[in-house]
Protein backbone atom coordinates (compact mmCIF):
# COMPACT_ATOMS: atom_id res chain seq x y z
CA UNK A 1 0.00 0.00 0.00
CA UNK A 2 1.36 3.41 -0.99
CA UNK A 3 1.28 6.18 1.60
CA UNK A 4 0.49 9.65 0.31
CA UNK A 5 2.03 12.01 2.86
CA UNK A 6 0.24 15.09 4.13
CA UNK A 7 2.19 18.23 3.33
CA UNK A 8 3.14 20.40 6.31
CA UNK A 9 4.62 23.91 6.47
CA UNK A 10 6.39 24.60 9.76
CA UNK A 11 6.47 28.29 10.66
CA UNK A 12 9.12 29.00 13.26
CA UNK A 13 10.84 25.68 12.61
CA UNK A 14 13.86 26.58 14.75
CA UNK A 15 11.84 27.34 17.89
CA UNK A 16 10.87 24.74 20.47
CA UNK A 17 7.41 24.04 19.01
CA UNK A 18 8.80 23.95 15.47
CA UNK A 19 11.56 21.52 16.44
CA UNK A 20 8.99 19.31 18.18
CA UNK A 21 6.81 19.41 15.07
CA UNK A 22 9.74 18.31 12.92
CA UNK A 23 10.35 15.40 15.31
CA UNK A 24 6.72 14.32 14.84
CA UNK A 25 7.13 14.59 11.05
CA UNK A 26 10.36 12.60 11.19
CA UNK A 27 8.69 9.79 13.16
CA UNK A 28 5.46 9.73 11.13
CA UNK A 29 6.57 6.79 8.97
CA UNK A 30 6.05 8.80 5.80
CA UNK A 31 2.56 10.06 6.69
CA UNK A 32 3.80 13.67 6.96
CA UNK A 33 6.25 15.67 4.81
CA UNK A 34 7.76 19.05 5.65
CA UNK A 35 7.31 21.03 2.41
CA UNK A 36 8.10 24.44 3.90
CA UNK A 37 10.18 25.81 6.77
CA UNK A 38 10.60 29.32 8.13
CA UNK A 39 12.72 30.96 10.82
CA UNK A 40 13.65 34.42 11.99
CA UNK A 41 17.12 34.56 13.50
CA UNK A 42 18.51 31.04 13.75
CA UNK A 43 19.57 30.57 10.16
CA UNK A 44 22.33 28.02 10.80
CA UNK A 45 19.71 25.71 12.33
CA UNK A 46 17.29 26.46 9.47
CA UNK A 47 19.99 25.39 7.00
CA UNK A 48 20.56 22.16 8.96
CA UNK A 49 16.82 21.49 8.90
CA UNK A 50 16.71 22.22 5.18
CA UNK A 51 19.44 19.70 4.48
CA UNK A 52 17.71 17.12 6.66
CA UNK A 53 14.08 17.53 5.51
CA UNK A 54 14.57 18.85 1.95
CA UNK A 55 11.49 21.13 1.90
CA UNK A 56 10.32 22.74 -1.33
CA UNK A 57 10.45 26.22 0.22
CA UNK A 58 12.29 27.98 3.02
CA UNK A 59 11.79 31.50 4.38
CA UNK A 60 13.98 33.65 6.59
CA UNK A 61 12.32 36.73 8.04
CA UNK A 62 15.50 38.48 9.21
CA UNK A 63 16.61 40.14 5.97
CA UNK A 64 20.17 40.95 7.09
CA UNK A 65 20.89 37.38 8.16
CA UNK A 66 19.20 35.94 5.09
CA UNK A 67 21.32 38.08 2.75
CA UNK A 68 24.49 36.96 4.52
CA UNK A 69 23.74 33.30 3.80
CA UNK A 70 25.04 31.67 0.64
CA UNK A 71 22.60 29.13 -0.79
CA UNK A 72 22.97 26.47 -2.02
CA UNK A 73 26.00 25.17 -0.17
Image: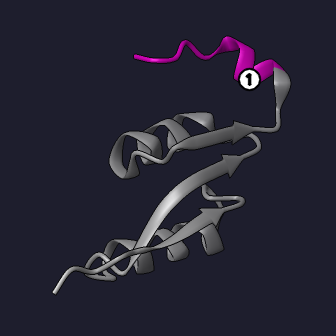
Q: Quadrant of the N terminus?
A: bottom left
Left or right relative to 58: residue 65: right
The x and y percentages for residue 20 are 52, 76
Residue 38 highlighted magenta (yes or no):
no
Left or right relative to 51: residue 65: right
Q: Nearer the viewer, residue 30 or 41?
A: 30
The x and y percentages for residue 13 are 61, 58
The x and y percentages for residue 39 are 70, 47
Q: Residue at x 74, y 23 (%)?
A: 65
Q: Is residue 12 above or below residue 69?
A: below
Q: Residue at x 40, y 45 (%)?
A: 54
The x and y percentages for residue 57 are 59, 42
Q: Residue at x 71, y 60 (%)?
A: 11
Q: Is residue 1 above or below residue 58?
A: below
Span colored in magenta: 64-73
Q: Nearer the viewer, residue 53 or 43?
A: 53
Residue 72 highlighted magenta (yes or no):
yes
Other-residue count near label 1 (Cα within 10 Å), few / some / many at <14 / 14–19 / ≥20: some
Q: Which residue is mark 1?
A: 65
Amino acid sequence: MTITPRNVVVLGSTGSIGRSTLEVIEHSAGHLKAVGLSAHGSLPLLMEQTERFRPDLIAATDEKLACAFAWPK
